[in-house]
């Protein structure tokens, strides 16, 4: 079963990625959607054939125990063995709860799932990506969360049958209110492009360079631990082992030397650009493209050239 | 108010992780072990909310984890329980079962964990404990207010914050931003040495998660230095557009 997460009624990309993954595994699956106003049929485009849409006025907002009960019951009812979720804020919160209810073992934030006979071969990063662990879940039922942006969402399906089920689940806790983050900004874990700055920026007063480059590229702003510890940037922008792990298509590291804990959080990005004046900076070891020069010369030029092309 | 803080001992972030020759384990000999950074936020929050006498640090693992327990005690907490095992279980479900059985014996109004341990990165514990103990949990909390048994917890999600309200007892997993953990004072460090750590033996449940092998991530091929001045920018953008096709 694939739990298809949505945000404000819009299905998230990870839902499509997981449908594509399930389809690729070649197993029978169905999707579960929870919430009233969601275009659940869209999952068909990515290969879902059957979608069960659980509707409830009470579950408009996320309820950890309510969603968990509903999904565990759905797994039982369908006789499903595997539940795939996204390793998102909701997925990470919810998945262990469902696992516990099903007596299932669970693997978090997986980057590779293959069918190995009747079993699953699962690979997941540990120590923030310093090592990759191949793991085996031996319980009858298994719960797996998949890292966003790892599997492609392939539009190779047609349409799905959507069955609506009125749900009347009891729950203890529910989100009371959702408040926008600092500026309701794009989160580094969700962005296709991330532009991060580090100590090389010399101070918060120069951060407009990162913001302007990010905005020219349609990217999210990230920061190194040094920049966050110095109080230049909020902690929710921190990329690295004690911050967020990201895997965007493009990661631009500006004035970041590349401490091991930072590399752990971003080295699985598809393409990495490093801009740093120190040719010995470890960031160049993981970068696909580098410019060894003063960021205060390079970044304004980048912004100018990108804007000129738009 | 009684508070338990569940902590884990982990390698520090600068540690280069070494895999054993048979690929089955991580070599521990060169590791500098520390208190999991996210757990520090839990310890600090507990100290802000109640008297140090009412705080119990709980950790499961082999004998070496007592050094992480002492680090948490050095911040000010006055009680500790060490759930002794031969090694750290690979399956978070086992740890959750053992912790839940010990936590149920205490009369805790609040239970803190870190939002994840920075070694196995499972981030499952608070949710697992919530189910096993049948009490609410809020994960990745950056703001907390506890008054007369009512908890307001603000949790970080992608680009926004969710606010939960629930009653005690409940579980909170702490995220960076919740507070600024204090540094242990010399007095705190000396005091921590005097605390008797209560030892508990538990029967561990069956493991359903096995690491078959560890591998290092694939080495990236050496990248291309496009240039050494801003004049390299047009070529960089061309490569990103035509070769990488990412912009």
Image (spheres, rainbow, N blue to C red):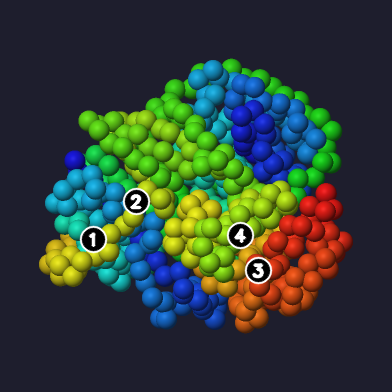
Q: Residue at x 58, y 34 (%)?
A: A75
Q: CA distance from mark 4 to mark 2?
A: 24 Å
First in sequence: mark 1 vs mark 2: 1
Q: Residue at x 75, y 70 (%)?
A: B230
**Circles 4 and 1 on the same chain:** no
Q: CA distance from mark 3 to mark 4?
A: 12 Å
Where does the image place residue B3, in percent across and percent down from the top left? 23, 46
Q: CA distance from mark 4 to mark 1?
A: 33 Å
Residue A196: numbered disc: 4
**Viewer-proximal residue among A94 and B146:** B146
Q: Up-down: is B202 above or below A173?
A: below
Q: Disc 4 sits on a residue from what chain?
A: A
Q: Disc 1 sits on a residue from what chain?
A: B
Where does the image place residue A70, in percent across and percent down from the top left? 53, 29
**Viewer-proximal residue among A23 and A261:** A261
Badge 1, how many Cα within 10 Å: few under 14, some, many 20+?
many
Q: Residue at x 42, y 70 (%)?
A: B12
Of tags 1 and 3, the one toward the viewer is 3
Residue B75: numbered disc: 1
Q: CA distance from mark 2 to mark 3?
A: 33 Å
Can residue A134 be seen at all in this image of the molecule? no
Q: Name the element at disc 2.
A: loop
Q: Which residue bears the numbered disc 2?
A: B179
Q: Which residue bears the numbered disc 3?
A: A295
Where does the image place residue B86, in percent across and percent down from the top left? 34, 68
Residue B157: numbered disc: none
Q: Is B247 on the left or on the right of A61, as rendered?
A: right
Of tags 2 and 3, the one toward the viewer is 3
Q: Are marks 1 and 3 in contact (CB under 8 Å)?
A: no
Q: Are marks 1 and 2 in contact (CB under 8 Å)?
A: no
């Amino acid at each position: 079963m694939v739990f298809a997460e949505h945000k404000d009624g819009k299905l998230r990309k990870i839902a499509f990625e997981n449908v594509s993954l399930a389809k690729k595994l070649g197993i029978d699956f169905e999707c579960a959607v929870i919430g009233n106003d969601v275009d659940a049929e869209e999952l068909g485009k990515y290969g879902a054939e059957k979608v069960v849409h659980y509707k409830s006025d009470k579950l408009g907002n996320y309820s950890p125990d309510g969603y968990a009960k509903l999904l565990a019951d759905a797994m039982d009812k369908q006789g499903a063995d595997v539940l795939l979720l996204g390793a998102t804020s909701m997925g990470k919160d919810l998945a262990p709860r469902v696992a516990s209810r099903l007596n299932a073992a669970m693997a978090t934030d997986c980057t590779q799932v293959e069918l190995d006979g009747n079993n699953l071969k699962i690979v997941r990063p540990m120590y923030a990506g310093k090592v990759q662990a191949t793991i085996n879940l031996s319980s009858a039922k298994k719960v797996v969360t998949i890292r966003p942006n790892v599997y492609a969402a392939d539009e190779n399906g047609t349409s799905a049958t959507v069955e609506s089920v009125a749900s009347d689940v009891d729950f203890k806790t529910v989100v009371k209110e959702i408040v926008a983050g600092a500026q309701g900004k794009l989160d580094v874990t969700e962005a296709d492009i991330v532009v991060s700055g580090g100590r090389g920026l010399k101070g918060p007063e120069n951060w407009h360079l990162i913001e302007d480059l990010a905005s020219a590229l349609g990217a999210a702003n990230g920061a190194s631990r040094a920049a966050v510890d110095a109080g230049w940037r909020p902690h929710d922008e921190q990329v690295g082992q004690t911050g967020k792990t990201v895997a965007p298509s493009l990661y631009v590291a500006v004035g970041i030397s590349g401490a091991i804990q930072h590399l752990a959080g971003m080295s699985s990005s598809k393409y990495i650009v490093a801009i740093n004046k120190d040719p010995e900076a470890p960031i160049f070891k993981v970068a696909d493209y580098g410019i060894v020069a003063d960021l205060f010369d390079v970044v304004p030029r980048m912004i100018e050239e990108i804007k000129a092309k738009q | 108010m009684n508070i338990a803080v569940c902590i884990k001992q982990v390698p520090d972030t600068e540690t280069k992780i070494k895999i054993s020759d048979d690929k089955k384990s991580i070599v521990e000999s060169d590791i500098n072990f520390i208190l999991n950074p996210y757990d520090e936020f839990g310890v600090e929050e507990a100290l802000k909310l109640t008297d140090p006498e009412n705080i119990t640090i709980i950790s499961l693992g082999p004998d070496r984890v007592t050094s992480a327990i002492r680090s948490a005690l050095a911040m000010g907490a006055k009680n500790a329980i060490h759930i002794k095992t031969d090694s750290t279980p690979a399956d978070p479900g086992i740890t959750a079962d053992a912790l839940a059985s010990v936590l149920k014996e205490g009369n805790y109004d609040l239970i803190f964990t870190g939002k994840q341990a920075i070694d196995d990165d499972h981030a499952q514990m608070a949710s697992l404990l919530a189910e096993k103990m049948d009490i609410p949990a809020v994960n990745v909390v950056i703001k907390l207010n506890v008054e007369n048994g009512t908890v307001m917890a603000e949790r970080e999600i992608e680009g926004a914050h969710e606010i939960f309200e629930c009653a005690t007892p409940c579980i909170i997993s702490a995220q960076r931003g919740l507070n600024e953990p204090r540094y242990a004072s010399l007095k705190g460090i000396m005091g921590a040495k005097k605390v008797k750590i209560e030892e508990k033996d538990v029967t561990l449940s069956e493991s359903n998660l096995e690491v078959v092998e560890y591998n290092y991530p694939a080495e990236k091929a050496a990248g291309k230095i496009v240039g050494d001045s801003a004049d390299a920018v047009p070529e960089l953008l061309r490569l990103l557009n035509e070769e990488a096709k990412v912009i």
